[in-house]
């Protein structure tokens, strides 16, 4: 029994030492994922190599915990992910949540009702999963975000008939709301109205969709939480992204990097620009770090 106890202590110490060097937070869609929403075998190999060399590679996305886990679970050594734009931080291996931030319930129902009245697409993020209603799910395909993206997103969603009653009763506590309209003008009008509420933050992954989450919760919060847990200073943090919802983590990280296909707003904030997502830009960055 005594030997077993020492084995546990030895493992815990080594686990902490292994991840002491650096955090590299990498966005998924448009950054780590290719345009067909897959991760190349080369990127997987480089990430696994980076982890073995003491770099905590953290998939960081607006996606749900379930969706991120589905994408990266076969990459050896990847332990944590930052989900739903930083409203959740989870352990991929145990599904334990280290951070779980919620939108005020009355605001959720108001947004839900209005999107339904406007005949838009709405996706509700609650803890580890994302929820979509059967009648609104097809609307996402009417936008120009691409079939591969839509298929990938919906493949791990929980699809139900209606969440109206659960939302009215407060049974579903929501972390993030994903809204999309086929008409960019309608999205712009709805976003402007939503952004007036100071309790909410709005970001735009594309001109057809928007993400709504609690003000003060963002991807940079997830990096801070993991850095504090493993005593990693800010100067040893790197963030790589492509979109409006990556700005906060790009600004927070000691080194912020945009992929070549990134939005201009992110390129302006970034310290460096790497190759595009389809050219394995994040893997190139990791290789450079490993060479130092």
Image: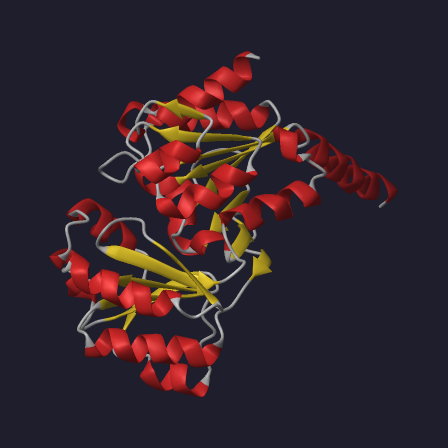
How many marks can you see? 0
Q: Residue furthest right?
A: 2
Q: Nearer the viewer, residue 1 or 154?
A: 154
Q: Residue furthest left?
A: 142
Q: Nearer the viewer, residue 255 or 131?
A: 255
Can the viewer see residue 271? yes
Can the viewer see residue 78? no
Residue 39: x and y, percent? 33, 34
Q: Quadrant of residue 285?
A: top left
Horizontal side, residue 154 vs residue 53: left or right: left
Q: In the image, is residue 220 above or below residue 173?
A: above
In the rendered view of the protein, which quadrant contains the C terminus? Answer: top right
Residue 142: x and y, percent? 12, 58
Q: Nearer the viewer, residue 186 or 138?
A: 186
For image coordinates 56% across by 52% down, the residue present is: 94
Q: Residue furthest top?
A: 291
Horizontal side, residue 182 vs residue 129: left or right: left
Q: In the image, is residue 7 above or below residue 198?
A: above
Q: How is the image coloured?
A: secondary structure
For image coordinates 31% across by 36% down, the residue present is: 264
For image coordinates 41% across by 20% down, the residue present is: 284
For image coordinates 32% across by 76% down, the residue present is: 112
Q: Quadrant of residue 223?
A: top right
Residue 269: x and y, percent? 43, 35
Residue 237: x and y, percent? 58, 33
């Amino acid at each position: 029994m005594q030997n077993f106890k020492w084995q546990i202590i030895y493992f815990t110490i080594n686990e902490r030492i292994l991840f002491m060097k650096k955090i590299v937070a990498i966005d998924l869609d448009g950054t780590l994922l290719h345009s067909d929403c897959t991760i190349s075998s080369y990127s997987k190999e480089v990430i696994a190599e980076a982890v073995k060399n003491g770099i905590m590679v953290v998939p960081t996305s607006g996606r749900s915990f379930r969706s991120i886990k589905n994408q990266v679970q076969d990459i050896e050594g990847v332990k944590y992910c930052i989900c739903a734009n930083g409203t959740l931080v989870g352990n991929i291996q145990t599904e334990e949540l280290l951070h779980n931030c919620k939108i005020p319930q009355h605001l959720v129902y108001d947004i839900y009702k209005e999107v339904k009245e406007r005949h838009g697409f709405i996706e509700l993020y609650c803890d580890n999963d994302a929820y979509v209603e059967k009648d609104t799910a097809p609307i996402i395909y009417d936008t120009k975000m691409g079939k591969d993206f839509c298929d990938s997103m919906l493949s791990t969603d929980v699809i139900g008939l209606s969440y109206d009653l659960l939302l009215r009763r407060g049974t579903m506590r929501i972390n993030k709301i994903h809204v999309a309209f086929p008409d960019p003008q309608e999205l712009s009008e709805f976003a402007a109205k939503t952004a007036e509420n100071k309790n909410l933050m709005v970001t735009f992954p594309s001109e057809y969709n928007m993400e709504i989450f609690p003000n003060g919760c963002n991807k940079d919060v997830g990096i801070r939480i993991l850095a504090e847990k493993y005593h990693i200073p800010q100067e040893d943090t790197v963030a790589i992204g492509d979109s409006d919802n990556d700005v906060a983590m790009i600004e927070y990280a000691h080194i912020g990097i945009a992929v070549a296909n990134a939005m201009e707003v992110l390129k302006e904030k970034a310290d460096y620009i790497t190759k595009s997502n389809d050219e394995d830009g994040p893997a190139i960055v990791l290789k450079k770090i490993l060479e130092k």
